[in-house]
Image: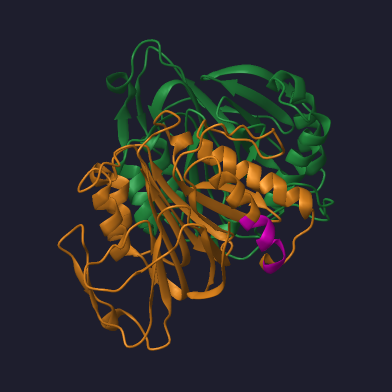
Chain colours: A orange, B green
Amino acid sequence: MCELLGMSANVPTDIVFSFTGLMRRGGGTGPHRDGWGIGFYEGRGLRLFQEPRASSESEVAQLVQRYPIKSEVVIGHIRQANVGKVCLANTHPFVRELWGRNWCFAHNGQMTGFAPSPGFYRPVGDTDSEAAFCDLLNGLRQAFPEPVAVELFLPSLVAACATYRQHGVFNCLLSDGDWLFSFCSTKLAHITRRAPFGPARLKDADVRVDFQAETTPDDVVTVLATEPLTANERWSLYRPGEWRLWRRGECVAQGLSD
Amino acid sequence: MCELLGMSANVPTDIVFSFTGLMRRGGGTGPHRDGWGIGFYEGRGLRLFQEPRASSESEVAQLVQRYPIKSEVVIGHIRQANVGKVCLANTHPFVRELWGRNWCFAHNGQMTGFAPSPGFYRPVGDTDSEAAFCDLLNGLRQAFPEPVAVELFLPSLVAACATYRQHGVFNCLLSDGDWLFSFCSTKLAHITRRAPFGPARLKDADVRVDFQAETTPDDVVTVLATEPLTANERWSLYRPGEWRLWRRGECVAQGLSD
């Protein structure tokens, strides 16, 4: 089982606190010893840190924890290998350019009997996750050769995820740096923090933060994770089949697929 | 003017020494204050570090200098912005997936009157460099829809570079993690280090290294740079129009375009 981490915010926000919790699960409090990765959007650019080893022992992970990179959209992942060997090419999140934007994808789960036909986008590694990501982009590209608003291809996105879910477990996060799409097959949680901000305490490490000291009254920050990361806040759990589209911290569309 | 750095080796080799010299040119001894980036291949995976600010002041650059990432192919770049604003999306090297491999590209120079027709690959930022990279991949993809050996598409690659060169200065490095292609429009230098290894002294920083202590007798390591990085070794200079294809440290093909 892997862990997902996502963030959508209306101001550039650092994710050091949540990342610290997630990283502890990578070989510390959790069994996810096979790699981790995190992508931070800066405008249309994407900054990606990845390592095919336990996050709790990773020097690069320590840098990312020390270094408050501020971003409006973040996608992170820690991995316990099920399919595909442990190597950089198999480490989430995966990135492809579509319509002149960087698309970033992370998957939690496992699929069986999934063999998509080869298309334009092809996997570099040998995970079912990257194969699904490529298939998803190939489908979108075929349906929409030119860029369209997310609202227009959202039904295609949801339909693709619903198909992948039939092959096993398919919780995922996907973004182009503007919006953040989330799909829950079995397990995903979210919390939206806004004024009045309060203190928060990590479940996986003895770390607390007072968000009030670090925010302005207009900030809206949503954090997504496979399981709630803090012990003293109320997280909302997705239902199986539920999807949500986030933009600048707010949920702008949601639904339930069959 | 920007600076390029490339490495091709027959064993995973760290590039800390050469990177240290290059980074000093990024706002230290050189005028390249507008960003830097470096991509390290690990198998088919690619590890990319980038920052849209002076490398001599960058915390991530310091990490890369401390952290001996071993790789067989490396492409690095420091930037002085000519075209396109200073931001992450405009920071070299650029990456795209083609034929299920990560292709990595860095360009030194400036082009005028270059407006390629839009294709499948589209620039995320607004540099002429990324536009040329996308155009080059679109051309290759059109000529070779399915993967072929580098020797087969090499003439197309050289022809594309010769075309771009007509629009200005086009020194570039390109790799898919297996081979490293280099094209010189005005300025590029190379050195191949092999047994017996000796000491080397950087031109841009008071740093010395004794390669003999860090290598085995079978190691072959080629370093490419816009200008020679060391003061006590004999670098070879490319001629204008010269291209070379490197693989595992050795030059496996070369030629001169018109």
The image shows residue A194 at horizontal and vertical percentages of: 38, 82
Q: Can residue B187 be seen in this view?
A: no
Judge from the rendering whether residue A227 lies leftward or rightward of residue A127; answer left or right.
left
Q: Residue at x 51, y 33 (%)?
A: A112
Q: Residue at x 71, y 54 (%)?
A: B128
* Position of A122 relative to A59 (above/below): above
Image location (x, y in percent) of residue B34: 52, 60
- Quadrant of the drawing holding the C terminus of chain A: bottom right
Q: Which of A2 and A105 is in front in this view?
A: A2
Residue A110, image x, y percentages: 46, 39
| Residue A161 visible to the viewer | yes
Place of residue A16 in the rendered image (x, y in percent of width and height, measured from the top left): 31, 63
Count of numbered tags:
0
The quarter of the picture where the N terminus of chain A appears is top left
Q: Nearer the viewer, residue A205 or B230?
A: A205
Q: Nearer the viewer, residue A241 or B187?
A: A241
In this rendering, would B57 be left or right of A140? left
A145 versus B234 height, above or below: below
The answer to if B27 sits in the magenta stretch is: no
Q: Based on the displayed image, in which of its 4 quarters is residue A130 positioned?
A: top right
Q: Which portion, as a residue range, is magenta? A: A151-158
Residue at 41% x, 32% y is A87
Magenta stretch, main secondary structure class: helix
Q: Quadrant of residue B237?
A: top right
